[in-house]
Amino acid sequence: MADDIPRLTMKADAERGLWTLSTTAGALGRPVVSGDTVYLQVSDSRIAALDAQGGRIRWCGEALTQPDPDALVCGGGAVVVPVQRDYDRSGFTALDAATGEVRWTRRKSGLHEAAAAGSTVVLWNASGEDRSRIAGVDALTGETLWEDEFERIGDLLVRGDRVIFEAGGYRALDARTGGEVWHEGYGSLLEQDGISDGAVFHDWSGGFSPALAIRASDTGKPLATTYFPKRALKDFSSPPTLVDGGRVLFSRPFERRVLLCAYAGLDQAVTLGKQRLGRWRLTSFSQPAVCVGDWVYALSLRQRLYAAKVGGKRGLRQLAVAYQDGWNPGALRPTEITAGPGHVFAADWRAVAAVRDGRVLWAAAADVSDNLPVPLGADRVLFRSSSRDRRVNRLHCADAETGRRLT
């Protein structure tokens, strides 16, 4: 065994699906979930794969040069990891999904974004001098299957074996051959979490007649279109975010307002709720708001968490989050929030917390920087912590409702 492989220790409660990975080798990276596997950086050069359900360590991969696992993609039996990544350039190394052994490497170039489409990995540029290039490579061998160029490549998403992106209008390419399947429509593509093989995709058209369309992935043709009253959107210039229940949420950083609308099955959108931060708060949003169930949540530049019930008479109100670090009480000043299926999670470098229905459920000391919790299904959450002397670093798979975890 190589000397630089870190010593990893796992505690697991199979009945409850709770587990904790511990190491004394240094800080653990932010976990990335793909299917039934959790990937995370466990040393400066190595990535480990864990079974998401029971926490079993499947493998600790070969040493890589400056890996960036936050942006890894999985497909076709390979885990493709950006390496030596800059703002607009990156190399890539593919690990075998079953063993962690290196399958292939690709030298650093302007193709710095990646997406998995079946047995193909699509590489492209969203910025920089090679902005218009796109290529498909075999996931297992790294062989370049096709390359193409466009005047401009904008948003990109995958639907089954189709790669759909904006380049002088929407285009769909066959992921394996690079052949153009269709060229149809204009606007902004809307991401939908957890969807990569769907028969449809969503897009947004602003301007004089704002509309959200559901389009067929195999033809690009609109199947349904919902129009939004322009007056209701006078405070919002950015495309909305898709949320559950056939709804969309309008919000953006450095603003104070949130708008939630229903669109599914409707010719005209219906406003469900519109909230704003009071001017006396002397602040604005630090990131786009999120919506879970009947509640919207926003994080302010002053590191305060706000919540409001959809359609309620009260506006966004501050949620105070207290936690206990040994004998010392503390107050969470969240720098990031993320939404799961039923909970919202907030974190700063000192602690993490869970919120549901506008109520703080639990908070736990963490003492780890860049510690955004990662939802794992509807009932669990991943977050990191360290011991008070910082000699032991942990990744917890905890109960989302109670915060129960193994230590």
Image (cartoon, rainbow, N blue to C red):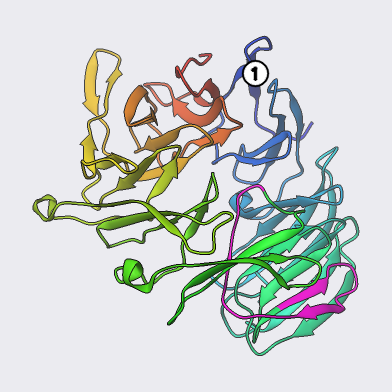
Question: Residue 94 sits in which quadrant?
Answer: bottom right
- Residue 66 in the image: state x and y as whole percent: 62, 55
How many tags in the picture? 1
Q: Quadrant of the N terminus?
A: top right
The answer to if 403 sits in the magenta stretch is no
Residue 337 vertical position relative to residue 53 in the rendered view, above or below = below
Left or right of residue 36: residue 229: left
- Residue 394 in the image: state x and y as whole percent: 52, 26
Residue 133 vertical position relative to residue 401 in the rendered view, above or below = below
Q: Tag 1, which secondary structure?
A: strand
Question: Which of these two is toward me, 230 or 10?
Answer: 230
For disc 1, the marked residue is: 10
Q: Amino acid at mark 1?
A: Met
Task: Please name the residue shown 84% across and 56% down the image.
Answer: 118
Residue 220 vertical position relative to residue 282 in the rendered view, above or below = below
In this rendering, does residue 115 appear at all?
no
Residue 113 vertical position relative to residue 353 in the rendered view, above or below = below
Task: Please name the residue shown 51% across and 71% down the image.
Answer: 211
In this rendering, does residue 232 appear at all?
yes
Which residue, as the protein is rendered here, is positioned at the far front?
267
Task: Please name the residue shown 70% across and 24% down the image.
Answer: 53
Which residue, as the protein is rendered here, is positioned at the far left?
280
Crowdedness near tag 1: few (<14), some (14–19) or many (≥20) residues, C-alpha within 10 Å:
some
- Residue 381 in the image: state x and y as whole percent: 53, 29
Question: Residue 159 sits in which quadrant?
Answer: bottom right
The answer to if 172 sits in the magenta stretch is yes
Question: Which of these two is toward me, 269 or 398?
Answer: 269
Question: Which of these two is toward me, 192 or 305?
Answer: 192
User: What residue span does the magenta drawing correspond to?
Assistant: 171-194
